[in-house]
Amino acid sequence: MNYTEELGKLADHQSRMLKNVSIDEMLAMSQAILDAKRIYVAGWGRAGNNIKMLSMDCSQIGLHTHIVGDNSTPSIHEGDILVIGSGSGKTASMQLFAKQAKSHGAKVGLIVGAIDSPIEEMADLTVHIVDDTHTNGSYRATKGVLTDAERLVHADAFYPVMQTVCDFIRAICAEKLGVTPEDMAYNHNNIE
Protein backbone atom coordinates (compact mmCIF):
# COMPACT_ATOMS: atom_id res chain seq x y z
CA MET A 1 0.00 0.00 0.00
CA ASN A 2 1.25 3.49 -0.83
CA TYR A 3 0.64 5.23 2.51
CA THR A 4 1.03 8.76 1.18
CA GLU A 5 -1.47 8.07 -1.59
CA GLU A 6 -3.96 6.42 0.77
CA LEU A 7 -3.70 9.29 3.25
CA GLY A 8 -4.59 11.72 0.45
CA LYS A 9 -7.51 9.52 -0.61
CA LEU A 10 -8.74 9.39 2.99
CA ALA A 11 -8.59 13.19 3.31
CA ASP A 12 -10.53 13.56 0.05
CA HIS A 13 -13.05 10.93 1.14
CA GLN A 14 -13.67 12.56 4.52
CA SER A 15 -13.97 15.96 2.85
CA ARG A 16 -16.69 14.61 0.50
CA MET A 17 -18.52 13.06 3.44
CA LEU A 18 -18.40 16.33 5.39
CA LYS A 19 -19.59 18.39 2.42
CA ASN A 20 -22.60 16.05 2.10
CA VAL A 21 -23.78 16.69 5.67
CA SER A 22 -26.89 18.85 5.61
CA ILE A 23 -26.36 22.35 6.95
CA ASP A 24 -30.09 22.43 7.73
CA GLU A 25 -29.75 19.33 9.92
CA MET A 26 -26.80 20.86 11.78
CA LEU A 27 -28.67 24.14 12.23
CA ALA A 28 -31.72 22.29 13.57
CA MET A 29 -29.56 20.29 16.01
CA SER A 30 -27.78 23.45 17.14
CA GLN A 31 -31.09 25.22 17.77
CA ALA A 32 -32.49 22.24 19.68
CA ILE A 33 -29.37 22.26 21.87
CA LEU A 34 -29.75 26.00 22.49
CA ASP A 35 -33.47 25.63 23.23
CA ALA A 36 -32.93 22.83 25.76
CA LYS A 37 -32.80 23.46 29.50
CA ARG A 38 -30.04 20.87 29.77
CA ILE A 39 -28.09 18.80 27.24
CA TYR A 40 -27.35 15.13 27.83
CA VAL A 41 -25.06 13.13 25.56
CA ALA A 42 -24.60 9.40 25.08
CA GLY A 43 -22.67 7.14 22.78
CA TRP A 44 -20.59 3.99 22.80
CA GLY A 45 -17.06 3.41 21.58
CA ARG A 46 -15.61 5.98 19.21
CA ALA A 47 -18.97 7.68 18.71
CA GLY A 48 -19.20 7.93 22.50
CA ASN A 49 -15.81 9.61 22.69
CA ASN A 50 -16.85 12.13 20.03
CA ILE A 51 -20.17 12.95 21.65
CA LYS A 52 -18.45 13.47 25.00
CA MET A 53 -16.30 16.11 23.32
CA LEU A 54 -19.52 17.84 22.18
CA SER A 55 -20.63 17.89 25.82
CA MET A 56 -17.29 19.39 26.88
CA ASP A 57 -17.56 22.03 24.16
CA CYS A 58 -21.13 22.87 25.19
CA SER A 59 -19.95 23.42 28.76
CA GLN A 60 -17.23 25.75 27.49
CA ILE A 61 -19.81 27.93 25.74
CA GLY A 62 -21.80 28.12 28.95
CA LEU A 63 -24.48 25.48 28.43
CA HIS A 64 -25.62 22.97 31.06
CA THR A 65 -24.51 19.56 29.84
CA HIS A 66 -24.13 16.05 31.22
CA ILE A 67 -22.75 12.72 30.05
CA VAL A 68 -25.13 9.79 30.50
CA GLY A 69 -23.57 7.21 32.80
CA ASP A 70 -21.57 9.67 34.87
CA ASN A 71 -22.47 9.50 38.56
CA SER A 72 -23.12 13.25 38.70
CA THR A 73 -25.67 13.21 35.87
CA PRO A 74 -29.10 14.35 37.11
CA SER A 75 -32.44 12.96 35.96
CA ILE A 76 -33.67 14.00 32.51
CA HIS A 77 -37.02 15.77 32.05
CA GLU A 78 -39.23 17.65 29.63
CA GLY A 79 -37.34 20.56 28.15
CA ASP A 80 -34.05 18.64 28.09
CA ILE A 81 -32.41 16.99 25.09
CA LEU A 82 -30.43 13.76 24.80
CA VAL A 83 -27.99 13.84 21.88
CA ILE A 84 -26.84 10.37 20.86
CA GLY A 85 -23.82 9.67 18.67
CA SER A 86 -23.95 6.33 16.84
CA GLY A 87 -22.41 5.08 13.63
CA SER A 88 -25.02 2.39 13.05
CA GLY A 89 -27.98 3.89 14.90
CA LYS A 90 -28.59 0.40 16.28
CA THR A 91 -26.52 0.23 19.48
CA ALA A 92 -28.76 -1.52 22.01
CA SER A 93 -27.86 0.66 24.99
CA MET A 94 -28.40 3.84 22.95
CA GLN A 95 -31.83 2.56 21.88
CA LEU A 96 -32.66 2.04 25.56
CA PHE A 97 -31.42 5.53 26.48
CA ALA A 98 -33.49 7.08 23.69
CA LYS A 99 -36.62 5.27 24.92
CA GLN A 100 -35.96 6.34 28.48
CA ALA A 101 -35.39 9.98 27.51
CA LYS A 102 -38.61 10.02 25.47
CA SER A 103 -40.54 8.45 28.35
CA HIS A 104 -39.47 11.38 30.55
CA GLY A 105 -40.55 13.97 27.99
CA ALA A 106 -37.10 14.89 26.69
CA LYS A 107 -36.22 15.38 23.04
CA VAL A 108 -33.79 13.02 21.35
CA GLY A 109 -31.21 14.15 18.82
CA LEU A 110 -29.08 11.73 16.82
CA ILE A 111 -25.80 12.10 14.95
CA VAL A 112 -25.56 8.96 12.84
CA GLY A 113 -23.84 7.27 9.92
CA ALA A 114 -26.88 5.27 8.78
CA ILE A 115 -30.30 6.14 7.41
CA ASP A 116 -33.58 4.90 8.90
CA SER A 117 -32.02 3.28 11.95
CA PRO A 118 -33.97 2.18 15.05
CA ILE A 119 -32.70 5.18 17.03
CA GLU A 120 -33.64 7.57 14.22
CA GLU A 121 -37.21 6.29 14.42
CA MET A 122 -37.30 7.63 18.01
CA ALA A 123 -35.31 10.79 17.36
CA ASP A 124 -36.87 14.23 17.08
CA LEU A 125 -34.01 15.39 14.87
CA THR A 126 -31.09 13.74 13.14
CA VAL A 127 -27.80 14.77 11.57
CA HIS A 128 -26.82 12.20 8.93
CA ILE A 129 -23.18 11.58 8.07
CA VAL A 130 -23.52 9.24 5.14
CA ASP A 131 -20.67 7.54 3.32
CA ASP A 132 -22.35 6.53 0.09
CA THR A 133 -19.18 5.57 -1.77
CA HIS A 134 -17.48 2.90 0.35
CA THR A 135 -20.14 1.28 2.46
CA ASN A 136 -22.94 -0.51 0.59
CA GLY A 137 -25.37 1.27 2.92
CA SER A 138 -23.46 0.71 6.16
CA TYR A 139 -21.45 3.33 8.04
CA ARG A 140 -18.25 1.33 7.63
CA ALA A 141 -16.32 0.39 4.52
CA THR A 142 -17.43 -3.06 3.46
CA LYS A 143 -15.72 -6.01 1.81
CA GLY A 144 -16.04 -5.99 -1.94
CA VAL A 145 -16.31 -2.20 -2.19
CA LEU A 146 -12.63 -1.60 -1.40
CA THR A 147 -9.58 -3.83 -1.21
CA ASP A 148 -8.66 -5.18 2.22
CA ALA A 149 -5.76 -2.70 2.42
CA GLU A 150 -8.05 0.22 1.51
CA ARG A 151 -10.63 -0.94 4.06
CA LEU A 152 -7.98 -0.67 6.79
CA VAL A 153 -7.61 3.02 5.93
CA HIS A 154 -11.23 3.93 5.17
CA ALA A 155 -13.09 1.57 7.51
CA ASP A 156 -13.97 4.17 10.12
CA ALA A 157 -14.14 7.45 8.18
CA PHE A 158 -17.44 8.22 9.94
CA TYR A 159 -15.77 8.99 13.28
CA PRO A 160 -13.39 11.83 12.36
CA VAL A 161 -16.15 13.36 10.25
CA MET A 162 -18.51 13.06 13.23
CA GLN A 163 -16.02 14.96 15.36
CA THR A 164 -15.86 17.75 12.81
CA VAL A 165 -19.67 17.87 12.67
CA CYS A 166 -19.77 18.17 16.48
CA ASP A 167 -17.18 20.96 16.31
CA PHE A 168 -19.32 22.76 13.74
CA ILE A 169 -22.48 22.37 15.85
CA ARG A 170 -20.56 23.88 18.79
CA ALA A 171 -19.41 26.76 16.58
CA ILE A 172 -22.99 27.46 15.43
CA CYS A 173 -24.20 27.46 19.05
CA ALA A 174 -21.35 29.71 20.18
CA GLU A 175 -21.96 32.18 17.35
CA LYS A 176 -25.68 32.35 18.10
CA LEU A 177 -24.92 32.97 21.79
CA GLY A 178 -22.26 35.56 21.04
CA VAL A 179 -19.61 33.48 22.81
CA THR A 180 -16.03 34.38 21.96
CA PRO A 181 -12.93 32.19 22.01
CA GLU A 182 -11.90 34.15 25.13
CA ASP A 183 -15.19 33.15 26.83
CA MET A 184 -14.51 29.53 25.95
CA ALA A 185 -10.99 29.80 27.34
CA TYR A 186 -12.41 31.19 30.60
CA ASN A 187 -14.81 28.21 30.86
CA HIS A 188 -12.12 25.67 29.93
CA ASN A 189 -11.28 23.10 32.60
CA ASN A 190 -8.79 24.63 35.02
CA ILE A 191 -8.49 21.69 37.40
CA GLU A 192 -5.99 19.68 35.42
Image (spheres, rainbow, N blue to C red):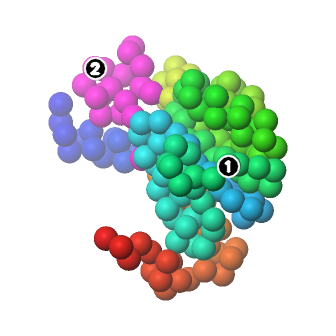
Is residue 128 left or right of 158 when viewed as pictured? right
Tell whether position 145 is magenta. yes
Q: Residue furthest bottom?
A: 182
Region rendered in magenta:
140-161
Q: What residue did someone put label 2 on?
A: 148
* Label disc, if present, on residue 165 of the rendered structure: none
The reply to whether residue 69 is visible in this rendering is yes
Distance of label 1 from label 2 (alpha carbons)? 45 Å
Quadrant containing the N terminus is top left
- Spot occupied by residue 7 in the image (x, y as percentages of width and height): 27, 44
Where 111 falls versus 156 (above or below)? below
* Mark nearer the N terminus (1 vs 2): 1
Q: Nearer the viewer, residue 164 or 81?
A: 81
Q: Nearer the viewer, mark 1 or mark 2?
A: 1
- Spot occupied by residue 71 in the image (x, y as percentages of width and height): 50, 49
Helix or strand or loop: what does disc 2 sit on?
A: helix
- How crowded pointer 2 is (Cα within 10 Å; few <14, some 14-19, many 20+) is rated as some
Q: Nearer the viewer, residue 3 or 180?
A: 180
Q: Residue furthest top?
A: 144
The amino acid on which the numbered mark 2 sits, given as a three-letter code, is Asp
Helix or strand or loop: what does disc 1 sit on?
A: loop
Where 27 falls versus 7 (above or below)? below
Is residue 41 left or right of 22 when viewed as pictured? left
Quadrant containing the C terminus is bottom left
The amino acid on which the numbered mark 1 sits, given as a three-letter code, is Ser
Tell whether position 186 is magenta. no
Residue under the image location 34 percent in, 41 percent down = 9
Q: What residue did someone put label 1 on?
A: 75
- Spot occupied by residue 53 in the image (x, y as percentages of width and height): 47, 56
Residue under the image location 53 percent in, 54 percent down = 72
Residue under the image location 72 percent in, 40 percent down = 101
